[in-house]
Amino acid sequence: MIKEAKYKMSEERLNELKEELHYLTTVREKEIAEQIKEARSFGDLSENSEYDEAKAEQSKHIAKVAEIKNLVENAEIVHASDRTDFVGMGSKVTVRDIEFAVDETYEIVGSQEADPAIGRISDDSPLGKGMMDKKKGESFEIDAPAGKLKFKILKIQ
């Protein structure tokens, strides 16, 4: 039997997914069923674009529900570390790009909560992996498409 992958996330993210799943399986499912019913009433299904669109929407809906169910069923709740002596899940870390002398602050989160545009990076990302378990003052390298990048941990919150 194949072991399902676990998806690291906070309890808040898991609750958001459960709420979305509830909405999709109750409200949205009824809306789509109504769209299909209405499209059927237009007559000949072989030339009925509204029916085709409603069925396509239903297919996307089924796929989305399956995806979210998989995430919920295989969620692994991670709790933010209260420790500030090393980088862990939930840590806010300020690092310096050694080559360019630029400081950036990131929060280490699970892959389901990552949003690099707002500084939330996954613990599975190259930068996230590079930071994990490091202490303030430590340097580390990561492999990137542009080559090796070097960083130094300045602050852990």
Image (cartoon, helix red, strand yellow):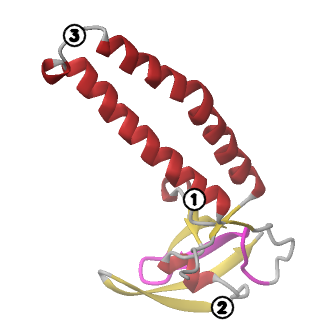
Q: In this view, does 113 lie above or below 108?
A: above
Mark 2, other Cα within 10 Å: few <14 / some 14–19 / many ≥20: few
The quarter holding residue 120 reads bottom right
Q: Which of 11 and 143 is in front in this view?
A: 11
Between the C-alphas of marks 1 and 3, the distance is: 37 Å
Task: Characterize the magenta stretch by its predominant secondary structure.
Answer: loop
> Given the image, on which type of amino acid does mark 1 rest?
Asn
Mark 1, other Cα within 10 Å: few <14 / some 14–19 / many ≥20: some
Residue 96 appearing in the image: yes
Dot 3: what SS?
Answer: loop
- Residue on which disc 1 sits: 70
Q: Residue at x 29, y 81 (%)?
A: 146
> Given the image, on which type of amino acid does mark 2 rest?
Glu
- Residue on which disc 3 sits: 43
Front of the two marks 1 and 2: 1
- Residue on which disc 2 sits: 138
Mark 3, other Cα within 10 Å: few <14 / some 14–19 / many ≥20: few
Front of the two marks 1 and 3: 3
Q: Where residue 98 sits: x, y (%)?
A: 49, 83
Query: Are the residues tagged 2 and 3 within 8 Å (C-beta)?
Result: no
The quarter holding residue 47 reads top left
Front of the two marks 2 and 3: 3
Which sits earlier in the primary sequence, circle 1 or circle 3?
Answer: 3
The residue range painted magenta reads 86-101
The reply, left or right, for residue 131 in relation to residue 89 is left
Q: Which image quarter is the N terminus in?
A: bottom right
